[in-house]
Amino acid sequence: MPPASAIALRPCSAQAHPNIALIKYWGNRDEALRLPANGSISMNLAGLETRTSVTWDEKRVARGDAFNLNGSPVTGPGLERVSAFLDLVRKMAGFDFRADVVSVNNFPAGAGIASSASAFAALALAAAKAAGLDLAEADLSRLARRGSGSACRSVPGGFVEWAAGASDADSFAVSIAPPEGWPLVDIIAIVSEAHKSTGSTEGHALAATSPLQGARVADAPRRLDLCRDAILKRDFAALAEVTELDSALMHAVMMTSTPPLFYWHAPTLTVMQEIRLARAQGLAACCTVDAGPNVHVICEADAAEAAARLIADMPGVREVRRAQVGGPAHIESD
Ligand code: DP6
């Protein structure tokens, strides 16, 4: 282990946005390494963020890591997941020090936005930098992936593609278009704030039990091509078609797993149907749903106002949130 004085440990704080997948990650080829069954594409969500600071404590190797989330200490499985992730950073840095991790989300739990992506992207950046490691974006994305698969997509900015890759070395995300490449808006229809009963990690492990997962994965390269092309050409009709297809395929796999996972509530389907009707009448809006009941309505900027009004009036919609396309994870101070 290098002497502490040679490492120049300093507290470090980083910020990352959550992301919404347009082509979904569902199922792993390797659970431990979080190597996904298929590639995925997402956009970062501006205005929503996790801010995380990490301080490595070189004097108190014997105590465990400490993790404070939104002002409360975290213990049990939440702390264990963070500690297991910090083990990876300790190994890279070549030291045994424990860490103090303080993390704050500016969006509430249950707001329809998965926090693990922004959480592990910010933690990867803050923990590595505080350990004196200067990682290239691809290596940071690979590291974040080990904490939560979708976190690798919150490292680069704008529209991001995570290539499934063949191994740990080539499974990371890159930006395919900057935030200003296409000013889309995500309008999130909150239909339930209840905590989901089956989290993503458990859900990924069930994907292979669905007879439909093989077909979903086999067709993924075609959908990735369609989605990437639509983003690069700003072709909303093409984006809408492939985004809705991909979301439906993932939910078909979820619903046909053993045991089955039904994340939709009745208002989830109402929003999806109403948005399809509105699109047929010319509104540039389409739907995608993650591992929960809330609906992300992706819109062109000039359709956002009308879409938000329409969604707010739909039965079962409790709240509407909005996010534009966000930038990369970044250091706040060092
Ligand atoms: C439905 O990245 O949350 O949101 O790696 O177990 O943390 P873990 O899973 P996670 O899975 C995301 C699933 C999804 C689709 C997506 O974001 O691609």
Image (spheres, helix red, strand yellow):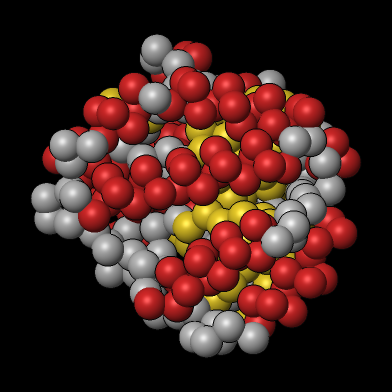
Residue 279 lies in what quarter of the image?
bottom right
Q: Nearer the viewer, residue 46 or 16?
A: 46
12 up-or-down from 265: above or below: above
Q: Nearer the viewer, residue 119 or 228?
A: 228
Q: How many marks?
A: 0
Residue 325 % position (x, y): 77, 49
Residue 7 % position (x, y): 65, 29
248 up-or-down from 134: above or below: below
Q: Nearer the viewer, residue 307 or 48?
A: 307
Q: Residue at x 25, y 28 (%)?
A: 214
175 up-or-down from 106: above or below: above
Residue 96 lies in what quarter of the image?
top left
Q: Residue at x 55, y 38 (%)?
A: 242
Residue 235 % position (x, y): 75, 36
Q: Nearer the viewer, residue 284 or 82?
A: 284
295 up-or-down from 83: above or below: below
Identity of the residue furthest to the front in this view: 281
The answer to whether 55 appears left or right of 93 in the picture is right
Q: Residue at x 65, y 36 (%)?
A: 238
The answer to whether 245 appears left or right of 213 in the picture is right
Can see residue 70? no
The answer to whether 5 appears left or right of 268 in the picture is right
Q: Residue at x 39, y 14 (%)?
A: 167
Residue 154 % position (x, y): 63, 42
Identity of the residue furthest to the left in this view: 258
Quarter the C terminus occupies: top right
Can see residue 283? yes
The answer to whether 282 appears left or right of 160 in the picture is right
